[in-house]
Image: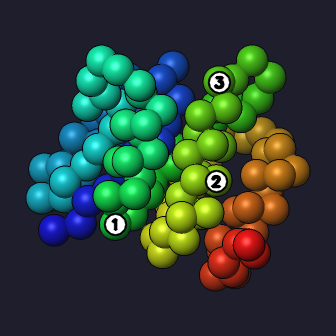
Amino acid sequence: MPHIFVSYPRKHAAQIVPVIEFIKAKGAKVWYDDEIRTGKFEDQIFQAIDESTAVIAFITQDSVGPGSTGWVEREIGYARDSRKEFIYPCIIGDFQLPETLKQTLSLLQQGSAPTA
């Protein structure tokens, strides 16, 4: 069964957690921030991405706009740099993506691996 890492803006948990629960109900193992234990949360996030088969990133204006924490972009970038084969961006809303994220998503869509 696939192990899926879910990235999302915490502000939209009420809308996204039911989607996560639906995926779990279909039998997939899903990791999202409700599994963060005390300690260094950044290490736990990157370890969960490393252990995942796929990454689903819910991208909203709040997750990439001014005042965002930047975590959704960082998680997408880390997954890309880790050469995750399955990264599924889900853009929610009508807004302008930052240019760097547009480029990252374009490369993912083309199946291009990052250059080292």
Image position, residue 23 (x, y; %): 24, 52
Q: In the displayed structure, would residue 85 be above or below residue 31?
A: below
Real-space Cα separation, disc 1 to disc 3, in angstroms: 25 Å
Q: Nearer the viewer, residue 54 or 27?
A: 54
What's under tag 3, amino acid-wise? Thr
What's under tag 1, amino acid-wise? Thr
Classify the position of the N terminus by image quarter: bottom left
Give left or right: position of 100 versus 31: right
Q: Earlier in the sequence, mark 1 or mark 2?
A: 1
Determine crowd level at label 2: few under 14, some 14-19, many 20+ residues with C-alpha closer than 10 A.
Answer: some
Q: Earlier in the sequence, mark 2 or mark 3?
A: 3
Determine crowd level at label 1: few under 14, some 14-19, many 20+ residues with C-alpha closer than 10 A.
Answer: some
Look at mark 3 in the image and give the residue it sits on.
69
Image position, residue 42 (x, y; %): 48, 32
Real-space Cα separation, disc 2 to disc 3, in angstroms: 14 Å
Determine crowd level at label 3: few under 14, some 14-19, many 20+ residues with C-alpha closer than 10 A.
Answer: some
Image position, residue 73 (x, y; %): 65, 43
Tag on residue 77? 2
